[in-house]
Image: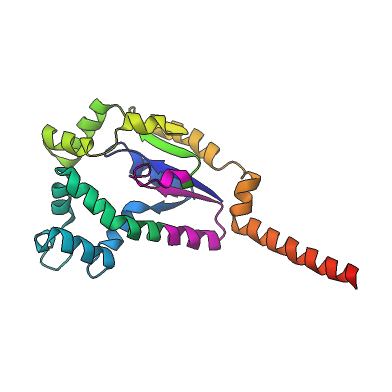
């Protein structure tokens, strides 16, 4: 099995690339979707966050007001670290079980879409690592336009994350999304070819098919040994 790491920064276009993988039949485990699930009312993550941040972050129906919580943690590094620490075990567990489900179903290539891939130390479980990069000026402009927010607020949200330039140095593959959508599609085609090329023997051994082959080989070997001894 090949587990591909996909990350980027806010408004860098990571979600667009993730959707491109999905549209080409590649399975994607989306950490953002899992994070939403672990914050649903009544879950363990919900209880931890409400206990730490208080009932003021809740909507009338008891669900977490995600934009309000986001405003709190984006402006306070200590609270942001606390939130990440509280939810990390639940998100990691959710990601693990999603990968297991796909492994059981026989998928050979999985893209792990995680905004905090490096911060959460999940990069060590993925190869190759893809970073969707844009220059700082373009990132700021796109975020302001997308969220209709002020320059100061947008810059604060960008500063709350590891810089894209630093992430770029840790990547195996960099997708430069500074240009047009057509440019992105062209770059993606090259990346897709690289990601979906035949598995190495090590990767095959970690796939369901590889595990079954090893199991059958062991069983056959044991039966042959018994036959020889008889």
Q: Position of residue 106 (x, y in %)?
A: 57, 59
How many numbered marks appear? 0
- What colour scheme was applied to this rendering of the protein? rainbow
Q: Is residue 64 visible?
A: no
Q: Where is residue 173 in the image (x, y as percent from the top left)?
A: 46, 33
Q: Was residue 122 drawn as part of the magenta stretch in this picture? A: yes
Task: Examine the rendered structure and indicate whether residue 74 appears above or below residue 64.
Answer: above
Please indicate whether residue 61 sits to the left or right of residue 118 in the image.
Answer: left
Where residue 86 sits, quadrant-wise, is bottom left
Task: Examine the rendered structure and indicate whether residue 183 appears above or below residue 85.
Answer: above
Q: Furthest-bottom residue in view?
A: 230
Q: Was residue 111 drawn as part of the magenta stretch in this picture? A: yes
Please tell me which residue is depicted at 28% across the width and 57% down the height of the picture: 87
Please tell me which residue is depicted at 23% across the width and 26% down the height of the picture: 137
Quarter holding the C terminus is bottom right
Please tell me which residue is depicted at 26% across the width and 63% down the height of the picture: 45
Q: Is residue 119 visible?
A: yes
Q: Where is residue 220 in the image (x, y as percent from the top left)?
A: 78, 65
Q: What stretch is highlighted in magenta?
A: 96-124
Could you say which is closer to the camera, residue 15 or residue 116? 116
Please indicate whether residue 30 sits to the left or right of residue 51 in the image.
Answer: right
Could you say which is closer to the camera, residue 179 or residue 71? 71
Q: Where is residue 34 in the image (x, y as percent from the top left)?
A: 34, 58
């Amino acid at each position: 099995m090949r587990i591909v790491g996909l990350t980027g920064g806010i408004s860098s276009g990571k979600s667009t690339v993730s959707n491109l993988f999905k549209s080409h039949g590649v399975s994607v485990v989306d950490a953002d979707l899992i994070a939403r699930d672990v914050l649903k009312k009544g879950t363990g993550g919900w209880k931890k966050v409400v206990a730490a941040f208080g009932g003021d972050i809740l909507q009338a129906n008891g669900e977490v007001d995600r934009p309000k919580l986001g405003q709190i943690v984006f402006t306070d590094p200590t609270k942001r670290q606390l939130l990440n620490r509280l939810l990390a075990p639940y998100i990691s567990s959710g990601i693990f079980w999603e990968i297991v489900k796909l492994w059981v179903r026989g998928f050979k290539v999985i893209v792990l879409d995680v905004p905090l891939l490096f911060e959460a130390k999940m990069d060590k479980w993925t190869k190759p690592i893809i970073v969707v990069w844009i220059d700082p000026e373009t990132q700021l402009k796109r975020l302001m336009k997308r969220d209709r927010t002020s320059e100061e607020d947008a810059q604060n949200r960008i500063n709350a994350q590891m810089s894209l330039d630093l992430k770029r140095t840790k990547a195996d593959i960099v997708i430069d999304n500074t240009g047009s959508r057509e440019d992105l599609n062209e770059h993606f085609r090259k990346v897709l070819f690289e990601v979906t090329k035949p598995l190495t023997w090590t990767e095959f051994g970690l796939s369901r098919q590889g595990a079954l082959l090893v199991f059958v080989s062991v069983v056959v070997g044991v039966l042959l040994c018994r036959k020889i001894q008889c």
